[in-house]
Image (tube, rainbow, N blue to C red):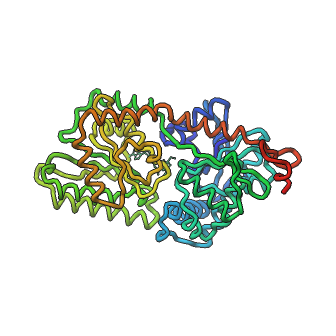
Amino acid sequence: MIVSNRAPSVDGSDDSGGLVVALKDALAKDGGLWIGGAAQQTERPSASLVLHHRADFDIGLCEMESGLYQDYYLGYSNSVLWPALHGRLDLIDVQPRYAAAYREVARRLARTIAEAVAEDDLIWVHDYQLIPLAHELKALGVKSRIGFFLHIPLPDLQTFKAIPDWRDLARWLADYDLVGFQTQRDLGHMINIFRHTLRGELRANGNMGIDGREIALGCFPISINVDGFRRLADEGAADTPPPPLPRLIGVDRLDYSKGLPQRLAGYEVFLESNPEFHSQVGLLQVAPPTRDDVDAYKEIRSELEHLAGHINGRFGTVDWTPVQYIHRALPRDQLAVLFRLSRVGLVTPLFDGMNLVAKEYVAAQDEADPGVLILSQFAGAAEEMPEALIVNPHDPQDIARAIKAALEMPLAERVERHGALYSHLRIHDVDHWSAAFLKRLLSVERIGVDGVAHFPGLEPWAAAG
Ligand code: GDG
């Protein structure tokens, strides 16, 4: 069973989202159930899952009232947890009803799942919207193995402790059998948080002992369907003319974690200090809207529009627009071609769990004449992609230097860097990610019928203590 905030569409018409692409094959293999919130809210929600059968797997929708969903999703998930876990404590909006709704949604989901689950099912829960789910499921007596994967960063202990419910969050995480992270960075933060908050002890096998239980922890960097994305780029590039000027490209949901104003500031410094590039290069920024009901998202939009206008006003000419900005989602196949035909990929988040755009940009390149990836040191992807030009997204001079180096990089160096990135990516694709997580979850011992956990490698005296 996969559980996520939103389930995929019932008719399979909208399977392009990263998570659905990533997991549908794994789920279809053994006939699974994907459970998530229904896309439409209703004032008379059903008490059970609303089931739909697809050819590849089943879908179970949990219905909710719109007020509850708003407080859980826009409220606690995206006005408390998202900013806090991305280190933006200044943007947290704490309201008691948000925390209550967050807990209530987990309870409801747990009740509906408990009705549908068999003891030897594996349950894989996704992301920050659903942290309390294992706690609620176990309170209802569910004995299945339950894994959790956090797609976004886990910050350091001090930042984590700024969340009013940090103790609850740590306890809820400790109720899973396996907790997976994108990076070693985030895994290290979890170990520290468990040690400090729950007196967790790190065991030789990398698991954490807490209150006589053992919780498996691991780092599972998410990835993309590399061959599929590469094919999209190949097919589209065959009949698309290259752009008139070398292009820099950025593609990001319009989110304050993605460092968009800082990226434009870096581009402005580049233009300021390299007049020979005026009229010789263009930046295309695609930034589709997301969560626009939250104030912080309205602010980032107007800041970005102001900066794009400012740069175009300052440097643009009748024949040249330095920044093209599109506040709309483009089709995925078009993105693949735009990546292929862009000399530089700009991925400069201030903090990011992984960042799949970095991987998509590399997968889309022509290996005989590849573009250059500029990547923030704070994107999870930087742990796996050291051959990119790694930058500090807070330093416009650093971004400007990297843009110049990328545009002037000789072919041999571009080929070498891309070759190293691409060969890593081909092995570490999205199937590798889901198989690694599921294999680890399967290896965790199930809670016995006596209600006591039996774990390999754990001494009986430790289990008792
Ligand atoms: C979270 C974590 C982690 C973007 N614009 C368009 C479009 N996109 C696609 C991209 C990419 C996806 O959306 C964005 O993925 P990211 O990984 O960059 O970022 P988040 O949405 O913040 O995702 C992140 C991820 O979960 C997975 O675990 O990597 O760190 O924050 O695939 O291409 N797709 C289309 N049109 C657009 O205009 N079709």
Say whether residue 353 is left or right of residue 442: left
438 w.r.t. 464: above or below = above
Q: Residue at x 75, y 43 (%)?
A: 117
Question: In this orientation, which residue lies closer to the viewer: 351 or 91?
Answer: 351
Q: Position of residue 456 (x, y in %)?
A: 78, 42
Say whether residue 287 is left or right of residue 315: right
Q: Quadrant of the N terminus?
A: top right
430 w.r.t. 252: above or below = above
Q: Residue at x 52, y 64 (%)?
A: 84
Q: Position of residue 462 (x, y in %)?
A: 82, 53
Q: Residue furthest right?
A: 450
Residue 252 visible in the current orientation: yes
Say whether residue 128 is left or right of residue 113: left
Q: Residue furthest left?
A: 318
Question: In this orientation, which residue lies closer to the viewer: 184 or 165?
Answer: 184
Q: Quadrant of the C terminus?
A: bottom right
Question: In this orientation, which residue lies closer to the viewer: 419 or 6?
Answer: 419
Q: Residue at x 37, y 58 (%)?
A: 259
Question: In this orientation, which residue lies closer to the viewer: 392 or 296?
Answer: 392
Q: Position of residue 296 (x, y in %)?
A: 43, 66
Say whether residue 150 is left or right of residue 381: right
Q: Residue at x 18, y 39 (%)?
A: 244
Residue 48 visible in the current orientation: no
Q: Residue furthest front?
A: 204
